[in-house]
Amino acid sequence: MEEVVNYGVLSLIPAILAVVLAFKTKNVVLSLLISLYVGALIIAAWNPWQALQDLFSNYLFVDITSSGNAQTIVMMSFVGGFVALIEKSGGAKAFAKAIAEKITGKATAQVFAWVGGLAIFFSDSGNSLILGPIFRPIMDRLRVSRAKLAYILDSTSSPVCILVPVTGWGVYIMSIIATEFENLGIVESEMSVFMKAVPYQFYAILALLLVPLIAAGKKDFGPMALAEESAKHGLTEEQKAADEEVIVSDDTNVSPWNMVVPLIVLFSVIFIMFIGWGFPTQNVPGSKIRVALTSGYFMASVALLAMIVRQKLMTFTEAFDTFIGGIKKMAGILTIIVCAWGVGSVCGNLGTSNFIVDSTVGVISPSLVPALLFIIGAVISFATGTSWGTMAILLPLGISMANGFGVSEYITIAAVLSGSLFGDHCAPISDTTVMSSMAAGCNHIEHVKTQIPYAGMAAAAAFISYLIIGVAQVSAFVALPIAIAVLVVLYLVMTKVWGLKEEAK
């Protein structure tokens, strides 16, 4: 890989280009590839031939072959096969019909989807891809927009995972904390530090609380309000064309158990493996978490395939072809993810994050450290589409600043995590953003446009809370209720000046 160099303002070009082109062209892959090539061009001293070679040799090939990314690609392939079997066999549709009587209103449907997202806490990607097929037909029937479903899926993916220590997110964060605490001579377990920082993770908490608040308020604003208004008239032709059709000969014979049993198998395999690796008393490495997830999806697919054949809904060949078709269908999303990894890598080599940090951090008051780190993290993560990369850069800096300024390490760590999460939640080049729009059957750019005002509102409330907690030196038990109150006020104001009232439940 290239030596990390700070290219000044030039380092911002690929990140800005990726976001602007994505909105302008509505073609995410093309936008990312152009952004990646321009970044390689800058590093290659504007030599187009060298940049072309570096595009593959230094970025795309390297990112695909790294162990964690390779695991993700294999896992996502099996997820695609599993989702295709669930959808095309009619399992998701039958399950949706079975619980339809219990979900009779828009608010109830949104809360059910939210609760489901909280329950699937162990995987940011699994969350969307499991719940999307289940709730899509329910939301369609109740005339809730695909954009709203994508927003709910996205808001209960990474914001949940970052609060739980036994997820890949938690393991990754604690590994950085442990290293920095050891370097500074601070004696405290990384698990203890992580848990003490949780109450201060304002953005993650507010992003989660905003979903039921919106469901209960029955009001939306901005682009989401327009999407909800449009959904009252039914699905668009584009949405209908993109939906997977049930291909069994007689879908009236499909049982809801065709959805339930595979999910039981999925969760059982995952947690049996977790327990075998010492969960919940020991940390499970991120690599093993991906092994468990991949194994779970594979065994769930085997179980469902066996049920489909035994019930004579499809022949073995048809069912297996459906599974393979699901894997093929993941090619598009995997292409986006790989390109996004490439943009993240080229931004790292350009020193994008270092430039943002150096341009922002100056002579500051210790009381402003949490709020400042939150803003820096939000800018970096949105620009690069990676929260993990942002955390790798800012956590060491934040912990050192906290130690030097005498600011609480727990608050500072939480502020970095909250800012880093923002980009993963709503950047158009973030993998979880892409997966949420795909799972909901929503146009990707529409998902980004409708979600950003809501995510921005949660971010504003979090920023205000970090200012309060820094200046007033109050505990999380005081600051968090204040943050929630700020969020509620902002929501009421935004719906008043920029919203449309939904139909009554």
Image (spheres, grey):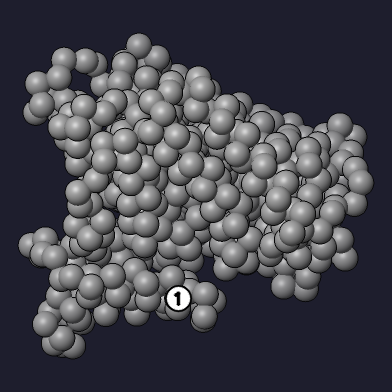
Q: Amino acid at mark 1?
A: Val
Q: Residue at x 84, y 54 (%)?
A: 501
Q: Which of the 4 quarters of the picture holds residue 218?
A: top right
Q: Position of residue 483 (x, y in %)?
A: 55, 34
Say which quadrant the N terminus sits in.
bottom left
Q: Residue at x 78, y 38 (%)?
A: 216
Q: Position of residue 413 (x, y in %)?
A: 31, 33
Q: Name above or below for residue 487 compared with residue 198.
A: below
Q: Nearer the viewer, residue 480 or 472?
A: 472
Say which quadrant the C terminus sits in.
top right
Q: Name above or below for residue 33 compared with residue 494.
A: below
Q: Residue at x 37, y 57 (%)?
A: 379
Q: Is residue 151 visible?
A: yes
For the image, the number of numbered tags is 1
Q: Position of residue 209 (x, y in %)?
A: 62, 35
Which residue is identified by label 1?
Answer: 20
Query: Would you say 209 lies left or right of 287 here?
Result: right
- Callout 1 environment at 10 Å: few (<14), some (14 to 19), or many (20+)? some
Q: Nearer the viewer, residue 337 or 67?
A: 337
Looking at the rendered structure, the secondary structure element under dot 1 is helix
Q: Is residue 220 visible?
A: no
Q: Which of the 4 quarters of the picture holds residue 370?
A: top left
Q: Name above or below for residue 281 compared with residue 485.
A: above
